[in-house]
Every structure is written in structure tokens, then in C-alpha cells.
Amino acid sequence: MEYYDVLANTVGGGKPKMRYHFDNNGWPAFFGGSQVPASEEQKSKMVDALQDQKTEFYKEIVESTATAR
Amino acid sequence: MQSLRATPNIAGRRAIDAAGSRTSPSTRRAVTRSPVKSTAYLTVDPDQYDPDANSGRGSGFVPSGAVSSHGGGVRPSRVTRGADGVVYDPDQYDADANQRSGGDVVPRPSGGSARQTEGSNTVDPRFALLFDCDGVIVETEELHRKAYNASFKHFGLTIPASGKVEW
């Protein structure tokens, strides 16, 4: 939670957040594999896929749990 | 081709035929019907009280503003018809608009809604614009964090040097 606070206040936007994190901690592989994205195109595809899936989860979470202050 | 002048109007012709059917040809004469001026379709009954229009169910009837001296139509109504012809009822309670995302329905406020618009210059209380910045109405940061982690888990993200990705 504390790390995300830093991230939220450091980098604007979901995709830049992921790029920032991966650039500083290493790029990950899908499904525990060893193939990490090497080219810029591969990195963009990974980030796009992660963001699209994140959006789907976010919509579910908002509809199921979000309440007005 | 007949001229318009030579052609009796349809009502007149039908009157002649009707008269002819009841009288002999020798006594047949033209009978024209006098136009009947009627404003019945413009009649507004000030005594009419439409419970639908005044309970917010929107039948469309709007009292003309006349106050009856016969006991009807005296109940005050806040229903008005806008310049665009749309009937506005500020007392209307729209259950759909008051349903929360979780399924709960906000109950109709008690004490009458007249107080709710005091001090407001809203022309049409049925509609409103909400201006919101992320995090004002709903605290969303934690929800975003959970969604990111769910996505990372969904794809089984693993950083070779440090393991699973979790924010």
C-alpha cells in the first residue's frame, strides 16, 4: 500500500506507472515464464494487455464494492 | 373538368342526398348545413384534477393555472410545462436515478422535496450535471491498486530477479 502511494504520487497514468516500475525492477514474464519483453514493441504489447485487463477488473471492483464517501 | 365554383362542397352534397332520400324528387331541395363553431377541443376544465400529473407519474396534464371556485383543482401543483413543451415535475421521484451501483435504492426523502430546491436556481430539477474529479465522490486509489494486482496475477507476472509483481 505504501509503495503504491509513492507510485501514485510519482507517475501519472496507469501505463507509465507500469513502465516506471518495470524499468526500475526489471521487466516481468507472463505466466512465470522466462521470456521477458526485450523490444519496445514487446513492452508496449505487454503493458497494453495488462492495462486492458486491469480496466476489466477495475470495473468489476467499482460496481461490486465502491461506495460514495 | 368542373370548376371549383360549380362543385358543391361535400357536406352540402351529402345533405342534398339525405334530403332527397326522404322526400320526393319534386320537393327535393338543397339543404346546406351551417358550420358549427366549436371550441370544445380548446376547452380547459379548471376543475380537473389529475392525480397522475400531480403525483409525478407524468400523464402530461398540466393545470392551466385557473383556480376553481367549485372545490376541485385547488390542490397546489408544482408541475409546469417548459418552453420546449416538456412537462416537468420537480416532485417526481425517479427510482432508477436513485439506485446505487450496489443495488440499494435511496428512499424518497421525507418532508417534501420543496425544501430541496430552495436557494437553487435550477430551472429543471429533474436533471443535473455532476462534476467530479477522480477520488472526490469515491476513493478509488485503493480500487485501482487492487485492479492492477488482479491483472498482474491474471497474467502470472514474474520478474526473474524479484518474483511476483504486487503493488
Image (cartoon, grey):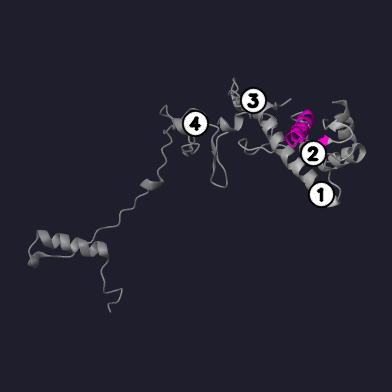
**Callout 3 and callout 4 share a chain:** yes
Marks 2 & 3, CB-CB < 8 Å contact: no
Identify the residue under disc 4: B54
Report in which chain the residue with disc 2 lies.
A
| SS type, badge 2 | loop
Disc number for residue A33: 2
The residue labelled by disc 1 is A42
Any magenta on residue B148? yes
The span shown in magenta is B141-158
Numbered disc 3: secondary structure: helix
At 73% from the left and 35% from the top, the residue drawn is B154
Viewer-side label of 2, 1: 2
Numbered circles on residues, count: 4
For label 2, count other residues whose C-alpha is less than 10 Å away and answer few (under 14), some (14-19) or many (20+). few
Query: Can the viewer see residue B94 in this picture?
Result: no
Q: Which residue is mark 3?
A: B115
